[in-house]
Amino acid sequence: MKKDWFQKRVVDLAKLHGYQKPELHSGVLKLDSNENLAINKQFQYDLIDNAKKKSDVREYPLGKIENLIQALSKYLKISPTMIGVGNGSDQILDLILANFATKKTKILTSDPTFGFFEERCKLYSIPTIKISFTKDMDLDLGDFVLNAKNADILYLDSPNNPTGFQFQKKELEKLIKSFEGLVIIDEAYGEFSDYSIINMIKTQQNLVVVRTFSKAFGLAGLRLGYFVSNKNFVDVFTRVIQYPYPINTLAIEAGIMALQKIKQMNEITNLIKQERKRIIDNLRKFGVFHVFDSKANFVLFDVEGADTRIYNALIEQGISIRKLGKIGSHKGCLRVTVGTKEMNSKFLLAIRDLLQ
Ligand SMILES: Cc1ncc(COP(=O)(O)O)c(C=O)c1O
């Protein structure tokens, strides 16, 4: 190998975009990252206070992840042998790609799909077969079935980020059953949606369902993700692939306590679903946007050529949403995260003012 191979690799990697984080604006209402701002701050204070009491961070968290897995097992009603964890679901997805995909492995997914996943495929030079959304931001099952035979891995975020689309349960089940390679279903927004396919792991040996505490539980800053799969995969992932201590002690303890507060989480999740409907209905009433249905905690809408203007005007009003631009035939897409009633009203009023 030539002596300058390292510099060349750095130059090559520098050509990649990497995951595009939202712009950082201080003091604004953050409706740009699908976080859960509707869950009150006391929820996290309780978890962190409790975690502090239970932790001694001079020690490695030996044996602690096992306690979190027990708590997850109760929540999901799935054997602990079929559950693993990660430093956010990002890390789980990354480690699966790094260890199960190569430059020759073809991944079948939607276009758009979760941005981090797409960037990771680019980083590892993994080829993708992308199925576009229709004009109404739906996916066609037939397109996936048709392309399945050419693919080794199927990745779907269900619901999809950024569109909010989710297949009908029967359709997704059919697709998973027909796919012969590895199937990764990312249910980061599962709690806001109509269904989960988590129970399919009891019969589908090739299925990994990835989930997170970042969305419904409102704990994005703790970086806690988990997955459910067959025992052999979980064993290999946990014992061989995963780092010895992927999650810090405080996050583990906070996660365990969060799972004792399911009632509170469910109440907020229901509120977010109601507010999602209010945002969709109101945006549609303005009569100038193309507003898409959503099964997640955000709403995608196309403002045609006006996306930059509306995005900047909202920033001036102290509201940050996500500018996505062109998606398929839609020229100027924006995505807003559902917040508290007050936050959502502030957003809707700002849009109304802009249109006057
Ligand atoms: C579809 C999807 N999967 C995974 C994640 C990442 O979740 P985590 O915070 O657990 O890494 C996100 C975050 O936005 C997401 O949209």
Image: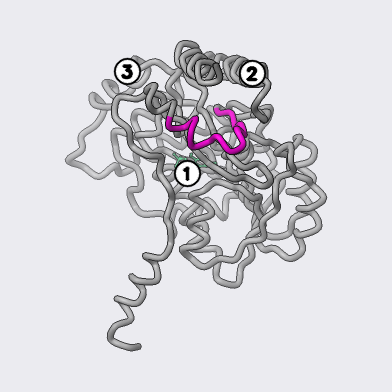
Q: CA–CA distance between discs 3 and 1?
A: 23 Å
**N-terminal of the two: label 1 or label 2?**
1
Q: Is residue 292 above or below residue 116?
A: above
* Amino acid under disc 1: Ser
Circle on res. 324: none
Q: Secondary structure at mark 1?
A: helix
Circle on res. 286: 2
**N-terminal of the two: label 2 or label 3?**
3
Q: Is residue 337 above or below residue 155?
A: above
Residue found at the very far left of the displayed protein: 58
Report the label total.
Answer: 3
Residue occupied by mark 1: 89
Which quadrant of the view contains residue 154?
A: bottom right
Instruction: Give 38 or 304, whichever is nearer the viewer.
Output: 304
Q: Secondary structure at mark 2?
A: loop
Position of 159 compared to 269: left or right?
right
**N-terminal of the two: label 3 or label 1?**
3
